[in-house]
Structures are given as C-alpha cells and as structure tokens.
C-alpha cells in the first residue's frame, strides 16, 4: 500500500487588513517589511559572521517594534 504524505500545502490567499489611507499605518508597515527583509538578507549571506548576525538581530528588533506600533495604531482606529 502506497501512502503519500503531503509536506507542502497551498497557502490561503493573502489578505491585507492594513489601512492604506493612514500615512502612519503605511509608514509603520513599510518600516516593518524593510527591517524584516534586511534581517533576512543579512542572515542568508554566505559570509554571515557575528557582526552580520548582530546587525540582523537589530533589524529584527526594529521590525518587531514597528509591528507592535502598527498593532496599536490599528487597535486605536478600531480595525482589529
């Protein structure tokens, strides 16, 4: 009996609930995305040394702070 295990599944369609009219929301969203992308870029570098790891950590913390502020803004506006 041949049993296949599906290790990959299709993702749900991406839905954004970000208010695209509020400049503060847009700025925080961009800040979080850029910081995460920068952290991943540093981590994926073939020459990722201690300095790059420390920089990636800083960028990830910056992203987390932006996400936290973005959540607070959306809670204040009643979007959540």
Image (cartoon, helix red, strand yellow):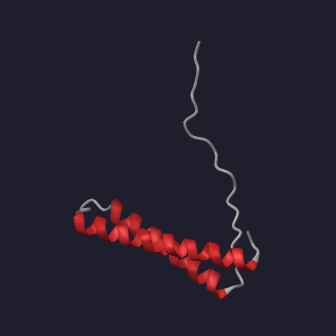
**Residue 3 at x, y = what percent?**
58, 20
Q: Residue at x 61, y 75 (%)?
A: 70
Instruction: Determine the residue located farthest toward the top in the rendered image.
Output: 1
Q: Does 56 sit above or below residue 28? A: above
Residue 43: horizontal and vertical position, in percent? 34, 61
Task: Give percent across and percent down for residue 24.
Answer: 62, 85
Q: Quadrant of residue 17?
A: bottom right
Q: Residue at x 58, y 16 (%)?
A: 2
Left or right: 77, with 34 as reference point: right
Q: Quadrant of the C terminus?
A: bottom right
Please state the total of marks drawn on the protein image.
0
Determine the residue located farthest toward the right in the rendered image. 78
Percent of width and height locating residue 65: 50, 74
Q: On the image, which quarter does residue 69 sit in? A: bottom right
Residue 3 visible in rendering: yes
Looking at the image, can residue 19 be seen?
Answer: no
Name the one closer to the observer, 77 or 16: 77
Assign the N terminus to one quadrant of the image: top right
Question: In the image shown, does 4 or 38 lie closer to the viewer?
Answer: 38
Report the side of 10 relative to 67 (left or right): right
Q: Residue 21 occupies which quadrant of the picture?
A: bottom right
Vertical comparison of 3 with 60: above or below: above
In the drawing, does residue 12 fall left or right of residue 78? left
Q: Residue at x 69, y 75 (%)?
A: 74
Residue in view at x 28 percent, y 68 percent: 52
């Amino acid at each position: 009996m041949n049993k296949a295990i599906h290790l990959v599944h299709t993702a749900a369609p991406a839905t954004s609930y970000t208010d695209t009219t509020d400049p503060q929301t847009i700025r925080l969203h961009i800040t979080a995305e850029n910081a995460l992308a920068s952290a991943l870029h540093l981590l994926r570098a073939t020459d990722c040394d201690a300095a790059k790891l420390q920089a990636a950590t800083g960028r990830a913390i910056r992203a987390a702070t932006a996400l936290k502020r973005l959540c607070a803004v959306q809670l204040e506006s009643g979007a959540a």
